[in-house]
Image (cartoon, helix red, strand yellow):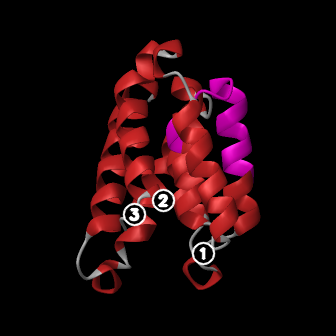
Amino acid sequence: MIDDLPWLYWTAASWGGELSLAPSQLARITELASVRALLGRAKALDANWERGAIYEALIPFDGLPRLLGGSSAAARADFDKAMELSEKKSVFAYVALATTITDPAEKKRLLAQALTIDVSTLPSRRLTNLIAQRYAKALLNGAR
């Protein structure tokens, strides 16, 4: 049901975020499938919801190593779709892709691009974009 979409998305986003910060990520690897399933269902209901938010959330999961079901091509495709739907105003998409990239120069370029976005141009995403910009700054300054 389409009314369930925000619940699916925010449950997956918060669960996925918590997993990315968990001290023993390997012990919780089986939870990835559940988070992917929530995002998959949300995408099936309305892939374009909130101007690409679902694609943004998929970037880190699709950017995981191949053994964990990831694919750099899929992560890049998620990024491209999120950029298209948000009219290139998604700070989180830049940051999410940067966290999957191993090339330091490309990672730095993506994080720098995230900081150039005017967060006031997409009012419904202002808070999440501000948080993502703060994270981008921390990553550029050498934080995890």
Q: Are marks 3 and 1 in contact (CB under 8 Å)?
A: no
Q: Which numbered tag is attached to residue 34?
A: 3
Q: Mark 1 or mark 2: name the one nearer the start of the chain.
A: 2
Q: Residue at x 37, y 78 (%)?
A: 30
Q: Which residue is farthest left? A: 23
Q: Characterize the local packing of mark 2: few (<14), some (14-19) or many (20 or more) Cα atoms within 10 angstroms.
A: some
> Above or below — where is 98 with respect to 43?
below
The amino acid sitting under disc 2 is Arg
User: Which region shows up in magenta?
Assistant: 77-92
Instruction: Pick the residue in front: 103 or 28.
Output: 103
Mark 3 lies on a secondary structure that is helix
In space, the residues marked 3 and 1 are separated at their CA atoms by 13 Å
x, y (%) of residue 82? Answer: 64, 37
Q: Which residue is mark 2?
A: 36
The amino acid sitting under disc 3 is Ser
The amino acid sitting under disc 1 is Gly
Q: Which numbered tag is attached to residue 69?
A: 1
x, y (%) of residue 33? Answer: 45, 68
x, y (%) of residue 75? Answer: 67, 58
